[in-house]
Amino acid sequence: MHKRKIVVCDHLHKKAEEILAKEQDIEYVNAADVPKGGPLYEKIKDADVIITRSSTPVDKELLEHAKNLKAIVRAGVGVDNVDMEECSRRGIIVMNVPTANTIAAVELTFAHMLSCMRAFPYAHNQLKLERIWKREAWIGNELKGKKLGIIGFGNIGSRVGKRALAFEMEVITYDPYISPEKATNLGVKYTTDFNDILACDIITIHTPKTKETINMIDREEIAKMKDGVILINCARGGLYNEDALYEGLKSGKIKFAGIDVFAKEPATDNKLLELDNVTVTPHLGANTEESQEKIAIGAATQALEAARGISYPNALNLPIKEDEMPPFVKPYLELTQKMGFLAAQVNKGAYKSIKVIAEGEIGEYIKSLITFAVVGVLKESLGETINYVNAEFVAKERGIEILSKKNPETSGYKNKVTVKLTTDRDIIEISGTIFEENVQRIVDINHFALDVEPKGKMILFKNTDVPGVIGEVGMILAKHNINIADFRLGRDNHGLALAVIIVDDDVSKDVLKELADLKACLSVSYAIL
Ligand SMILES: NC(=O)c1ccc[n+]([C@@H]2O[C@H](COP(=O)([O-])OP(=O)(O)OC[C@H]3O[C@@H](n4cnc5c(N)ncnc54)[C@H](O)[C@@H]3O)[C@@H](O)[C@H]2O)c1
Ligand SMILES: O=C(O)[C@H](O)COP(=O)(O)O
């Protein structure tokens, strides 16, 4: 039996191994202790799926060594260690395991906040390491009554807000991507003015690391803050500019900072460590037994599903989210892919453009239809290496123009999709619709009206519409023991006809040649759907 290989690249809770190691169809490799770079590349060179945490940089170099990789499971939330664009270009699906570590990160945020308020680690060290009992040296402050500014009000930020209210703090949040009610319903003030956050006593950030959020707090922002402000970062290093943070802490403008994450990790030589008004932890936001167990179960289960090609839960770079679409859309997507595949088999040549025309309500899903059409067309030449993630990248790289048109007006069908494939040799246009009960039908090929189920072995036979042709075609097929399962004919007003003949048996090149040699034949092609 061919086994699919799953490699775990970082330390996970033992539950992951319990789930993965017992599966008969899976080759499980634990590479958590394998050094990054060459030794790890050796382990992952034939992996189907890898599971990583933030310590494995999933960059171009790693991907270059993982030629068989189909999916990556990031056992956690942040995917800033993953080159998403490169993964998409290569058709690799990236998933994360959101929410499993939310509470762990929320509670660590409070650990830092309280530690900053009471200089907890310094008092602790003085007593424990120096055996000095000096109570008067450690006068702290209380959370009660302080104003907390939360940047990013997602899973973690919102729960930090909820708990801060229990500490009787005044809470305000800045997150332009949520509805204000998400905050106000909890009793948290919502602002679109970042200055309101900068005016707070304590500021904590809970956004992902993106182009927009890197250096979100820099010298300029720190200058606007209250003297003696406290800053917490349990999200990602670099969201607060580390040089600016260092200067602010050194000058006393920032009274204390609680930092779990660093721009470069491991951060053993980070200059923030020299200061005596920071509390630091080595990226422990997700490190609780509870959170790691949940993450391990989630990551292992997702990796199994992906390795078996069953599903891709929490996929981040899939352009199509089928579960968010109304049920009528899916059959159209499938039909569109089949029409693309049929078009590519019938119109062989160098692809110039792929156009999708959608009529009716289905037009709302034109982007997804395009993806499916492109996958259908390119599957003919690229086989299984093309998928919904890399389809448009690959098409662009090959210089294939992708065109689309939405037509709210319909031409007799409630919804209709047309795939038009232009190659250096020909143009083919195939239209299809879905009838009641999800029945897929091709209703037009190059302006010949037809009614064909897109399924099985199909001969497309174009001829001058003269008597006797059907008989001649039937005779040739019978002579070669090819059984006709269905015969559909489209005719135009110019004396031409197009037959789509569905057959039960394989059709050889010789048979196609015999058909092509018939006097009335204008073209013949063969496709298997
Ligand atoms: N220290 C750790 O170990 C640890 C653990 C878990 C998560 N994290 C980090 O915390 C981050 C947040 O996690 P989450 O689960 O709450 O994610 P989430 O996606 O639920 O929330 C992120 C929030 O940030 C907001 N946001 C994005 N860009 C913004 C911007 N420019 N300004 C303001 N808000 C913005 C989003 O709208 C969203 O509401 C993760 O991306 C991860 O990097 C760190
Ligand atoms: O983004 C996350 O989920 C956290 O930063 C945890 O990262 P880790 O899995 O490397 O601890």
Image (tube, grey):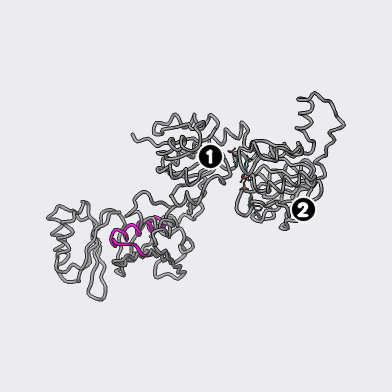
SS state under label 2: helix
Where residue 443 appears, as percent x and y from the top left, is 33, 64
> Which amino acid type is marked by label 2?
Ala
* Left or right of 349, for residue 286: right
Q: Marks 1 and 2, Cα distance to the nearest angstrom?
A: 35 Å
Which residue is the extreme one toward the right? 136
Where residue 428 appears, as percent x and y from the top left, is 32, 66
Which residue is the extreme one toward the bottom? 494
Range shown magenta: 332-352
Q: Would you identify the image quadrant in which residue 237 lies?
A: top right
In this view, 129 is above or below 426:
above
| Residue at image point 69% right, 40% down | 271
Q: Which residue is mark 2?
A: 223
| Residue at image point 47% right, 60% down | 365
Q: Categorize mark 1 by other alpha carbons within 10 Å: few (<14), some (14-19), many (20+).
A: some
Q: Which mark is residue 56?
A: 1
| Residue at image point 47% right, 44% down | 61
The question of residue 210 being in magenta is answered with: no
* Left or right of 196, for residue 500: left
Total marks placed: 2
Q: Would you identify the image quadrant in which residue 494 lies?
A: bottom left
Q: Quadrant of the N terminus?
A: top left
Ligand 2 rendered quadrant: top right
